[in-house]
Amino acid sequence: MTSPEAREEAVLEAVRQRREQVNEAIPDELPIKRPERLYEASRYLLDAGGKRLRPTVLLTTAEALADAEPLSTEYRSFPALDESGPIDMMAAAVSVEVIQSFTLIHDDIMDDDDLRRGVPAVHKEYDLETAILAGDTLYSKAFEIMLETGAKPDRIVEALGVLATTCTKICEGQSLDVTFEERTDVSPNEYLEMVEQKTAVLYAASACLPAILLGADDETIDALYGYGLDIGRAFQIQDDVLDLTVPSEQLGKQRGSDLVENKQTLITVHARERGVDVDELVDTDDVDAVTEAEIDDAVAELESAGSISYANETARDLVAQGKDRLEVLPDNEARALLCDLADYLIERGY
Amino acid sequence: MTSPEAREEAVLEAVRQRREQVNEAIPDELPIKRPERLYEASRYLLDAGGKRLRPTVLLTTAEALADAEPLSTEYRSFPALDESGPIDMMAAAVSVEVIQSFTLIHDDIMDDDDLRRGVPAVHKEYDLETAILAGDTLYSKAFEIMLETGAKPDRIVEALGVLATTCTKICEGQSLDVTFEERTDVSPNEYLEMVEQKTAVLYAASACLPAILLGADDETIDALYGYGLDIGRAFQIQDDVLDLTVPSEQLGKQRGSDLVENKQTLITVHARERGVDVDELVDTDDVDAVTEAEIDDAVAELESAGSISYANETARDLVAQGKDRLEVLPDNEARALLCDLADYLIERGY
């Protein structure tokens, strides 16, 4: 039995190794060309960093399906499960990351956020027009890139269907999120549905796309989609918890900013159901004006309402459920890594 | 030989008949569902009107390819050219119109235009967030709809490739258009390249998509793509001419507004090359402050530099070239209609 620390270290190393390969592939799939300003803006956030968790899920799932030793196979010419030709699995991985980047650019405009990944948001570094267009360019590029995997046409069609439906759901989720800001009666289930659409579907797509492209059966595809939905929701819930519990320096932004900005999280939704006057937890609407003591008091009140424990438990249950679904996969090292990745999403400190 | 008036009347009637069918299909392909506000905003411009020229080109090209009497075939179950099953050609037509609508919503944000099709722009009627999201939703919906034509998988893959590349080019063209606003040395060829990307590629896609979906050969697909590029550029040039020559009441906006707002058109680009000080043609930057007499003087100067004639001639040449390309099609009534449609795009009064 390996220690939890050793397992987390192994996950981080596995993510890092795949991230390097993904980072190398991005300029190949999305070269800076004319009009340069548009493509530079499109690449700006992609080049600014990111853990590449979704591509890592996608590439590791492919390895598990193929029963291949992790990192032993060329992602650019990955063997299909039947006699059909090799698949450019890296193209699929980049496509998913490109979708993620498009949504971040447009979300930052909608929320008028100034910073992302430690650099100015695209609409701040460039301008509103360029940011809208950069997002739109990434959108169609993701489809172009996914079209180049070399999979059989019926599998490409299915993969593009998943990609298109995923994008639609992300928009629906983002729209729900906006309407939730004006409501005080959002239930935990409604909140989880929103998170499923806004965040989890892209994890679900990442997990099931290699199964589609490689020619796995429907049961496997569905199980992997479910795994992605589960860990994606857990990931978002953990983000909400971290916003309250991790020191500001480590978070890279003010701790408790979700509370200050009256964002709904699973924690506030639960607390409100328990009678906590969530809107009065902090006095100010200004992230720059809030004190650490105010956040401490708010966290203590949410803690005593059982809301933070509730969020932790929900995330843990989702991760357990997601890991169970992986039993459709061959029992191999890559599958174990997908389990550890799921754990990492809720155990990570930031 | 039919008179030009009778031919124009016949084109308008043909457009009207297809428009009615397209208008009926839009709510089926894009129903208002939860979250309602998002889908209402997505449908807002589509429901506000539009000539449906691109779907008309698509549906009429399908008829010409199939050698079918215009309007004699169910668009929802259109016969392929080989033994493969029927094609939902209407889905393809709606997909193209949905792309067009997405670009209008995002363009209006970028230009901060207040009105579109006689109603407030989506970001005015709703808000910025909703307008960005509504455009993004239409984007993925267009792909979802195009996936439902029932064509053979390899043809669907090719069709989606055209759709994705088209969207990328539209973004590139829009980006060029923005950078052109700050330049005074844009050449007519550069301008035409921008128009090709921003406007003409969607006509090109409309003309070649039925050939792809029905299984025509590559020569036919390429010729139809060229036809669309030619008439699409002619369409945009004619728009630029109309902005100067049609009375404001008929245009539905101030005549000469492109000049007032310093927008580049083929006319101003040509005039600048001829030494006209285009920026000084009208004194004001405010569309509400300009007088008809100022516009008259500006038009006279552009006329005497030969710039309006040059634009008219360029559009006429493009239409002639486009019509020549249609010789790959069987000689039938639908092909004649595609020729008349091309003429209509540059003969229309508004």
Image (cartoon, coloured by chain):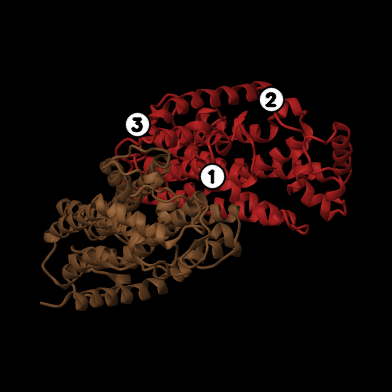
Chain colours: A brown, B red
Q: Chain of mark 2?
A: B
Query: Mark 1: which amino acid?
Result: Leu
Helix, strand or loop at mark 1: helix
Which of these two is toward me, A81 or A187? A187
- Quarter of image, res A8: bottom left
- Horizontal side of A247 relative to B170 (left or right) equals left
Name the mark on residue B4. Answer: 2
Query: Mark 3: which amino acid?
Result: Ser
Residue visible at 36% across and 34% down in the picture = B34
> Marks 3 and 1: which is nearer the front?
1
Spatial CA span between label 3 and label 1: 23 Å
- Quarter of image, res A334: bottom left
> Marks 2 and 3: which is nearer the front?
3
- Quarter of image, res B30: top left
Q: Give the position of the C terminus of chain A as an image quadrant.
A: bottom left
First reached walking from the N terminus: tag 2 or tag 3: 2
Disc 1 marks which residue?
B202
Q: Residues within 10 Å of mark 2 (few under 14, many from 20)?
A: few
> Marks 2 and 1: which is nearer the front?
1
Contact check, label 2 and label 3, Cβ < 8 Å = no
Name the mark on residue B77. Answer: 3
Q: Is B307 drawn above or below residue A295 in the view shown? A: above
- Horizontal side of A279 relative to B289 (left or right) equals left
Contact check, label 3 and label 1, Cβ < 8 Å = no
Is residue A255 at least partly visible in the picture?
Answer: no
Residue visible at 25% across and 59% down in the picture = A207
Q: x, y (%) of residue B308? A: 80, 42
Helix, strand or loop at mark 3: helix
